[in-house]
């Protein structure tokens, strides 16, 4: 079997396992006002790239598949928390080819669902090392800082390329960096190795966000599966 085909099969195997684990999260309970929007988000058509990255890098170091899956699902929930709140702030009405949570319900429901996804991501980490929890908290703060910078940059013509790269590094790159490094942390690998993996993931995130900002202007909603044009409408300098 060609190496590319074998790798693609491995990716699909990981994606299937991740989907199974996500659907084992107990969400069929009350209050439905809180849980139904969370289920809606997690049943979306996300590519699960971040949890897949957790497994791909983590399998280099860790013989703890349960710990890797915990971290992978926590990363995916944290990612979706950021998307739900980002859609409210940017007034984007489509995500993964379907109405955003705030569009299907309302802003209050979306804020609560995002909060719930954030809390669930940390609950799933129970049993992992305090340093793993610390890194999740540090990256969550970086995501929020990046989002704050993004809002501050609106209508500010003095923003430089350096400012932009710092902002997207926090907003997008930091979580991909965490996805790449956390497997080494679970396996008690060296902090130097974890740092290099974080930088690797961070650079993936930078490339992804630069491409995403380009497609925001030149692509279509049908091909992207989300609302486009909000950056221009809000006066962002991206």
Image (spheres, rainbow, N blue to C red):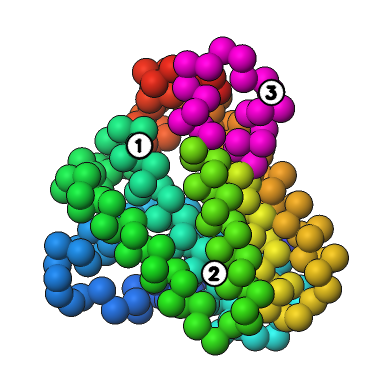
Instruction: Give the main secondary structure of the magenta stretch.
Output: helix
Would residue 109 be found to the left or right of residue 46 on screen? left
Q: Which residues are magenta?
A: 149-169
Residue at the spot of label 3: 161
Dot placed on the residue nearer the N-terminal end, 1 or 3: 1
Dot 3, how many residues are within 10 Å of its Cα: few (below 14), some (14-19), or many (20+)? Answer: few
Q: Are marks 1 and 3 in contact (CB under 8 Å)?
A: no
Residue 153 colored in magenta in the image: yes
Residue 35 in the image: state x and y as whole percent.
22, 67
Residue at the spot of label 1: 89
Gap in Å between the C-alphas at discs 2 and 3?
32 Å
Dot placed on the residue nearer the N-terminal end, 2 or 3: 2
Dot 1, how many residues are within 10 Å of its Cα: few (below 14), some (14-19), or many (20+)? Answer: few
Looking at the picture, does residue 156 appear above or below residue 163?
above
Kindly identify the residue that appears in the image at 26 percent across and 51 percent down. 110
Dot in front, 2 or 1: 1
Would residue 166 be found to the left or right of residue 155 on screen? right
Residue at the spot of label 2: 72
């Amino acid at each position: 079997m060609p190496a590319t085909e074998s790798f693609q099969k491995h990716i699909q195997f990981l994606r299937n396992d991740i989907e199974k684990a996500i659907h084992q999260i107990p969400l069929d309970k009350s209050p439905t006002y809180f849980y139904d929007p969370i289920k809606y988000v997690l049943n979306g058509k996300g590519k699960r790239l971040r949890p897949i990255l957790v497994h791909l890098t983590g399998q280099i170091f860790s013989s703890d598949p349960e710990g890797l899956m915990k971290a992978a699902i926590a990363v995916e929930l944290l990612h979706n928390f950021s998307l739900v709140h980002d859609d409210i702030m940017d007034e984007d009405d489509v995500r993964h080819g379907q109405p955003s949570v705030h569009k299907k319900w309302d802003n209050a429901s979306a804020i609560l669902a995002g909060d719930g996804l954030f809390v669930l991501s940390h609950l799933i980490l129970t049993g992992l090392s305090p340093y793993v929890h610390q890194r999740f908290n540090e990256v969550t703060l970086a995501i929020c800082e990046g989002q704050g910078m993004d809002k501050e940059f609106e209508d500010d013509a003095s923003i430089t390329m350096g400012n932009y790269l710092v902002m997207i590094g926090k907003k997008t790159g930091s979580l991909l960096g965490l996805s790449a490094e956390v497997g080494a942390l679970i396996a008690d690998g060296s902090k130097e190795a974890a740092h290099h993996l974080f930088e690797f993931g961070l650079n993936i995130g930078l490339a992804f966000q630069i491409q995403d900002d380009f497609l925001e202007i030149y692509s279509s909603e049908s091909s992207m599966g989300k609302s486009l044009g909000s950056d221009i409408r809000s006066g962002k300098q991206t």
